[in-house]
Amino acid sequence: MYAFEYVRANSVRGAVSALAKHEDGKILAGGHTLLPTMKQRLASPSALVDLGAIKDLAGIEQRGRSLIIGAMTTHAAVAASDVVKASIPSLAEMAHMIGDPAVRNRGTIGGSIANNDPAADYPAACLALNATIVTNQRKIPASDFFKGLYETALEPGEIIVRVAFKPPSRAAYMKFRNPASRFALVGVFVAKKGSDIRVAVTGAGNQGVFRWRAAEEALAKRFNPKSLDGLKADAGMMNADIHASPDYRAHLVAVMTQRAVAKALGK
Amino acid sequence: MASVSMTINGKAVRANVEPRTLLVEFLREHQRLTGTHVGCDTSQCGACTIHMDGKGVKSCTVLALQCEGAQITTIEGLANGEELHPMQAAFRENHGLQCGYCTPGMIMAAIDIVKRKGHDLDEHVIREELEGNICRCTGYHNIVKSIAAGAKAMRGHAGLQQAAE
């Protein structure tokens, strides 16, 4: 790891001004992607601005119809939260599938979303659940937030403070793990809220998380796994690496979507 | 250099460190607490697992500076003098180790599992929860047995456990 300056921010405002002072500064949330990336010297920020001491960035609450999760809330906290389980159980289940117990004790929702790793789980949940990502400057709908591999709508100096979810009527997440890394080779989050059906796919796309519109249209006719029979995802959109070919990923997308719909229906 | 204060195994520690100092490096090199091991250095193997504010954490993926004000417990902080922590004793009695390299992380992870999942742990739960701890001797059978026994033995040792935190 290259040397850097460390700033412990005590407020979001303080973090913003610290970032402004360091041209190549980066926000440190749970650090479970950033620090490994820095160890590999794939990133060498001049400064890290740690949000860990800003207590009001972590927390979970049901506010009216919205489930609000603070940016610094850990995956373990989301997975174990009775509030999340009551409001959006599929979200708690998804958080429980991230990494391992020690990783979940440090990794955060804000960090995961801001990083937008093409195999991360949270971007799929945010997209399928039509979440609102609230920053220190504005509210960004998930559909405008994820912009490609590791790219988001965040501007320099913009910090995620919380994420707001509207509970769906039915939802489920199914993940086909890479057997070694345990990251999603393909992960599919399906959510139904009235007539609005969203199918968000992570791990598979060569441009990161995406909505599988053809499946959404098929499910709009009838929300049932059978509606997807014979439907194929476009292999041209899929990522190719040593772990899986585009064709295999496209096949898995269809299988995992059917399984997610079945799970959402309690089958 | 930047200053950091934390409590390690009940003892207040204050030090100046380079910002890039990892917690595991701080524990091993600066505090000479070499019971915490570095296996993979990529947060996969769990040999460096310690407790930070009572929760299992991989100390290779935490900066020492992130631990300002934190309560840190390492494998050295578990025993009560000569008396082993029940989880340590269970690993000894059930021969839950071969080369021993992963053992400190296994024991710290095991205590974290008991805190979250209680004292009656079946094999399936233990194996699921050990996802982030790798034994390269592949001695999982006895590790799982040790954790099941240790979890039961920890009943009534809550006081000791809290003292260790």
Image (cartoon, coloured by chain):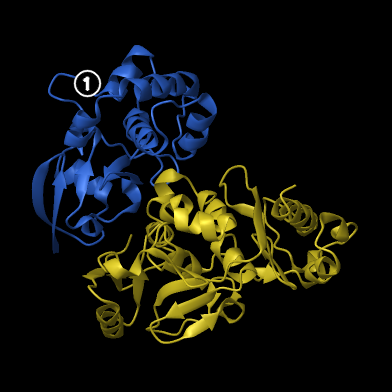
Say which residue label 1 marks: B84
Residue at the spot x=59%, y=60% of the render? A119
Where is residue B71? Give x, y as percent: 19, 47
Image quarter where the N terminus of chain B lies is bottom left
Colour assignment, chain B: blue
* Quadrant for the C terminus of chain B in the image: top left
Residue in the foreground of this view, choosing between B109 and A119? B109
Tag 1, which chain? B
Q: Is residue B77 left or right of residue A71?
A: left
Identify the residue at image location x=56%, y=47%.
A181
Q: Residues within 10 Å of mark 1 (few under 14, many from 20)?
A: few
Foreground residue, B58 or B159?
A: B159
Q: Secondary structure at mark 1?
A: loop
- Vertical placement of residue A40 versus A210, above or below: above
Which amino acid type is shown beneath numbered disc 1?
Leu
* Residue B110, percent from left and from top: 37, 32
Q: Where residue A233 appears, x then y in whole percent?
A: 81, 64
Residue furthest out toward the right: A230
The image shows a total of numbered marks equal to 1
Classify A169 as above or below A101.
below
Residue, x 40% and y 24% (percent of image)? B147
Left or right: B148 as drawn, with respect to A153? left
Question: Residue A234: which quarter of the image?
Answer: bottom right
What's the residue at 82%, 58% (across, down)?
A: A224
Query: Measured from the top left, where is residue A194 in percent x and y?
Result: 71, 71
Q: Is residue A133 left or right of residue A249?
A: left
State the residue in front, A130 or A13.
Answer: A130
- Chain appearing in yellow on the rendered image: A
Residue A34 picture quarter: bottom left
Q: Residue furthest front?
A: A64
